[in-house]
Image (cartoon, rainbow, N blue to C red):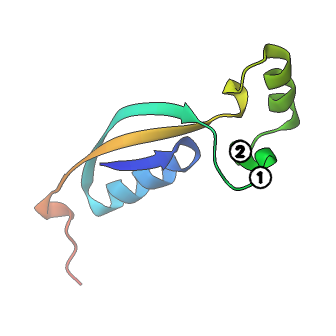
Amino acid sequence: MVFATEEHSADLKQDLRALGVAYERVKSYKTLNARGKWVRYTRTRSRWDDWILALTSRSLEPLSLTIVLYALGPRTKASVQVP
């Protein structure tokens, strides 16, 4: 099992494919990112529009970070590269 943020999941999937590791998206959830100061609890790429939407909707959903859980499978022998 491996966790990744939604914004980094494309890179993770690319790396897993390159290594020949099977993977399956199992679950995802939203959370605030704890990085020290209250302004930094939002996802990395939050925009001003996200803040306005959060304030008008009275919900932190637009500022939340999505975490994805992937189940990993075994590597295939064909995927192992010998130097």
Identify the image quadrant of the C terminus.
bottom left
Measured along the vertical axis of the image, is residue 78 above or below residue 23?
Answer: below
* Local secondary structure at mark 2: helix
Residue at 87% across, 26% down = 52
Q: Residue at x 54, y 41 (%)?
A: 6
Mark 1 surroundings: few (<14), some (14-19) or many (≥20) residues within 10 A: few
Q: Position of residue 18 (x, y in %)?
A: 34, 60
| Residue 37 tag number | 1
Residue 70 located left or right of residue 29: left
Query: Which residue is most to the left?
Result: 77
Classify mark 1: helix, strand or loop. loop
Which residue bears the numbered disc 2? 41
**Could you tell me the amino acid type at mark 1?**
Lys
38 lies left or right of 28? right
Verify CB contact (< 8 Å) between mark 2 and mark 1.
Answer: yes
Give the quarter of the image for residue 78. bottom left
Q: Residue furthest bottom?
A: 83
Residue shown at the point (73%, 20%) measured from the top left: 59
Q: Position of residue 40 (x, y in %)?
A: 76, 49
Q: Is residue 81 above or below residue 30?
A: below
Q: Which is nearer the eye, 22 or 67?
A: 67
Q: What is the x, y in percent for residue 23? A: 29, 45
- Name the spot of residue 2 as percent of width and height, x first: 35, 50
| Position above or below: 71 against 26 | below
